[in-house]
Image (tube, rainbow, N blue to C red):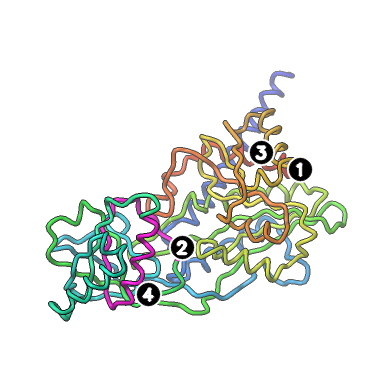
Amino acid sequence: MRKYSIFLCFLFIINAVSAQLEEARRITQTLCSKELHGRGYVNHGDSIAARFLEKEYSKIGLNYIKGHDSYFQSFAHNVVTFPGEMSVILNNDTLIPGVDFMVDPNSGSSNEIWNYISLRTDELFDQQLKERFLDSKRKITENVTGCVIDIRNIKGDSLKKMRLEIIPLLAQQLNVLVISDEKFTYSVGNEPYSYSLIYVKGYKFIGVSTIKTQIQARFKENYLSTNVIGTIPAIKKTKKTIVLTAHYDHLGKMGKNTYFPGANDNASGVAMLLELARYYAKNTVKYNLVFIAFAGEEAGLLGSGYFVQYPWLKLEDIEFLVNVDIMGSGEEGITVVNATKHSEKYQQLIDINSKENYVPIVKSRGPAANSDHYWFSERGVPAFFIYTMGPNKNYHDIYDTYENISFSKFIPISELLKKFINGL
């Protein structure tokens, strides 16, 4: 009989873990589906995601923060979007967006056949050579509309400097095409250029005589985005609060047919946030718990910056903040940003993991302004930013899909976080 009871207990645990993982997969798959348009600013993908999270918060049973009658904290910001046509044709070769080419997130519109000139990298770095080059070319050809720069031989710090030198060319009333073999990574822009800036893979720019572009950029001023905030009160009344956060926004669309799913970054993190919310809705602790799904992280940590400026709770009441991002792997462990700043709390994580062996390593990292914990840290709130390490290197590209996430350590990491939070 005792063996049978142990078997039933084991079976119950297996089923519970399976249900947890199924929920994480459901949340992630929904957030990175085509219907949410990459959770960006074309077709209000971020707003669709916010409404989805509102329903999930309500289903879990999260309360509104005292003094507020919804989960939503809205704020306005500027953003560059690409809602329409997105094509680059070299000779008769139509390139694939996100694979063969990428527009700069601040790129302007372009609908033309280029009359272009080529600029050497030494001319780009030397201001006098650059001005002499542009003047001489304009004397020969008055209707120059574009400039091509091959950066494939530029590396390291020179590459960073080169990028800064390219931007002024756009002020010279020139579209710019950059030939590059670097991995394409996208972001969100908020300062639109007057002319287009495009990055093209080197294997596509061979024997090119004709460049034709059709790029529709649209600048949106005072676009409304929304943080989604809920709470679980402590067992006994207290001001002390633990805050758990994850950003739900992503990069949106680059043209009407190409979107960035953002499965690992950060649909998986939102799935972890909701997993913790479900657990603590049934297992209350001595602290108040506040759950925040931030908007605008990819646009410059905007949602968290706004919250810190207009907080819904006193920042001095926050005992600790845990921000999770990129929770879809973990085969190689986790990294803890601010570990060097809060060494005792980091040691707690180490001790829990050493005892239970949840992940291969809990890696230490110093302070960094790389996610939503940053503004809280700047205001003196103790905070960790935790992200996974693993073989999935798809980041800010079209390949960060639901199918490419392993969820290998999702459940063990959730258990590690719960034990850490319970011990705070």
**Which quadrant of the figure has residue 227?**
bottom right
Q: Is residue 171 magenta?
A: yes
Which residue is the site of mark 3?
415
Compute the Cα span from label 4 to label 3: 46 Å
Which secondary structure, mark 1?
helix
Residue 73 falls in image quadrant: bottom right
Q: Nearer the viewer, residue 172 or 319?
A: 172
Residue highlighted by disc 4: 193
Mark pair 1, 2: CA separation:
34 Å
Q: Give the secondary structure at mark 4.
A: loop
Sequence-wise first label, 1 or 2: 2
- Tell me the distance, in whole angstroms, between the alpha carbons under discs 3 and 1: 10 Å
Which residue is at the front of the view, 22 or 7?
22
Q: Which residues are magenta?
A: 159-188
Q: Residues within 10 Å of mark 3 (few under 14, many from 20)?
A: some
Q: Is residue 248 left or right of residue 251?
A: right
Question: Which residue corresponds to mark 1?
Answer: 422
Residue that mark 2 sits on: 36
- Picture coordinates of residue 192 (x, y %)? 40, 74
Residue situated in front as seen by the camera: 314 or 57: 314
**Which marked residue is nearer to the observer: mark 4 or mark 1?**
4
Residue 92 drawn at (x, y percent) = 13, 63
Q: Amino acid at mark 2?
A: Leu
Crowdedness of circle 4 by 10 Å Cα count: few (<14), some, many (20+)? many
Residue 306 in the figure: left or right of residue 209: right
Q: Amino acid at mark 1?
A: Asn
